[in-house]
Image (tube, rainbow, N blue to C red):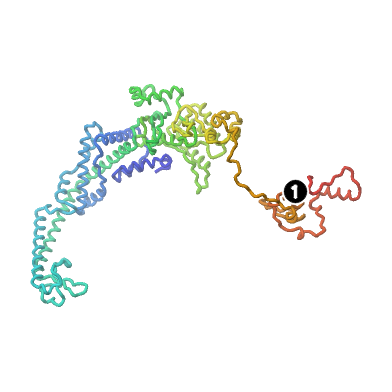
Amino acid sequence: MTDMEKVLEFDKIKEKWRNLALTDRAKMEIDGTKPFLEEAELRAKLRDTTEARIMLEKEGTPPLSALEGIREIMTVAERGDCLTAAQLEQAENALTAVKRLKEYLERCKKLELSLPWYEENLDELPDIREAIHIQIRAGRVDDYASKLLHSLRSDIVRTEERMKEKADSVIRSCKECMSDSFSVFRSGHLCVPVKKEYKFRVSGSVIDKSSTGNTLFIEPSTVAKYSEELQLLRIDEENEERRILYTLTVMLGEQGEVMEQNMKMMEKLDFCFSKGKLSMELGCAAPMINTDRRIVLKGARHPLMDRRVCVPQDFRIGLRDSEDTGSEMKDRAEEENTELGNQREQADKQNGQEYRGVVITGPNTGGKTVAIKTVALNCMMAQCGLHVCCEQADICMNSNYLCDIGDGQNLSENLSTFSAHITNVLEILRQMGRESLVIMDELGSGTDPAEGMGIAVAILEELRKSGCLFLVTTHYPEVKTYAEEAEGIINARMTFDKESLRPLYKMVIGEAGESCAFYIAAKLGMPAAMLETAAEAAYGSKKTQLNAFEAVFPEEKNTENKTSRSKIKKQKQTVRHADLSEKFRRGDSVMIYPDQKIGIVCEPVNEKGVLRVQLPEKKIWINHKRVKLHVPASELYPEDYDFSIIFDSVETRKLRHKMERKYVEEALIRGPGEQE
């Protein structure tokens, strides 16, 4: 199973398909199924699927068998060993299944299909099947398998009855010597239970004794002569049984090639009918195949979604039909004037060109990812020889399927969402070619929007140049613009009901979609002021989206946001300046949180609970709650220490010294709490 199958969920389709098969070989073939690359082979596989479904609908389920253990049985037979009666009976059941399947295929020949003619490759081996049926019953050789065996078994029954009569006669004649009134078999001998003290009263051989030792089990002499006769009869019976089993084994072993052909044909038909059963279970239709790089789907559904809730999609991409040869689907559409034919004609006229890429936009949860998966999964199913979940389909063969869906984040490899996304995209670009089908979800996501948009456009340009068919989803408006202008690419959108705020999951090709984020937010009650701010940030102007917001929520500007009113009444706390002023003193070394920087207090706490701290390069005002005493000033400086050395600049100290000696005109000395 490839990673691509898991991404597209084709592995889940295989699981459903596998459960409909009976034989192990058919299940193994299902597990190994890959898209066919030869057109003739693919058409043959699709024909088998179509005919199998017709036969299932017309004649019911075929009488297929699992054929468990038949190959092992045939290996034993061909090796020359003897099969058991149970093994021969199992082989007979397999031949009976072959007979019933031949009859089923014979009835289906009236449908004028090719699949029923596989009946000619089945051989029920009637002689062997009848011989086993007559001679083997209920897992053993039947009494009437041969005259000798019947005679031997009749003699065995008569001998056992005579032995029983003789033993009963001994019990009656020596009743007082017996522990019980009936005979028993011990070690293959018919014995009578004799009390220990009377062991010499009964003529015979002691075969066994009870656990207590009080009872001896003696085979009477009159019974012993019949016992020898019985043993000889049983030896003859066993020899005759082995002769019969060996004869049947040889007969079966000689038909090893025929049995192998029967099994292969049964497995082949089981594989074909499993495809027909899957088609019926999923409500599929037979697709048409082309090699013209064209995909046209009508009423396409995701195979794993409930048909009752899944919204069918109409989709078209690729080259127009060739005017010379045309296509089988277009001919039929023109003859029957089907909606599919009209839809394809309208798409050609609308676009006026052949487009190979579709850029799908629309709101979140709008079904974009499901839409691209639906297209890719149906294409892969068709190329694997399966019917597709569409009303009609014309699907091209693709050399490979390349997908980038999901974030792909890998913690073990230390890959972020964007890294994993780009890694996957680069691998896709290396592998893609003209015959590839590429699908990418959320193109350019997971990084800066502007850069992501540029990367998305670059990827689209590479996809366009390669000539492959591609479907991508995006939210970038610039990508929509690029798709409108670039040759060979067309926009598509997923519809959205603005009244109910519910996605409609319907794809419209030829139109660009909107994310509807502002509209949904407004509809759900986001204030107009917030929407205006969002619009200005997104589009550079409040007016671009304002009218739409007012239409949804016109009274918002005049309404008060009631939810913003606080319902919690907090206790008023007063700051006691007297207490705080003693908390920190000038010169204290303090630690400032949360940065955990060390500073020195310039000014103690004031009436507002704020103090000033000297840091290495500046002085700051800070709330006392963010400061913790580190080392008090009393431990750092003497009592008469001049703090101006720390807190005043050199110029200020010189000026103060001059002013102490004489008047200095226009000089101003700022205090420690003033701006410098």
Residue occupied by mark 1:
619
Image position of 213 (left or right of 468): left
* Quadrant that contains the N terminus: top left
**Does the rendering let one see residue 612?**
no
Q: Quadrant of residue 589?
A: bottom right
Name the kind of residue labelled 1 in the image: Lys
**Does the rendering let one see residue 72?**
yes
Q: Nearer the viewer, residue 450 or 516?
A: 516
Q: Residue at x 80, y 54 (%)?
A: 643
Helix, strand or loop status at disc 1: strand
Q: Position of residue 262 (x, y in %)?
A: 23, 43
Residue at the right extreme, as displayed: 662
Q: Position of residue 266 (x, y in %)?
A: 25, 42
Residue at the bottom extreme, as displayed: 197
Q: Position of residue 401 (x, y in %)?
A: 42, 37
Q: Position of residue 343 (x, y in %)?
A: 40, 25
* Quadrant that contains the C terminus: top right
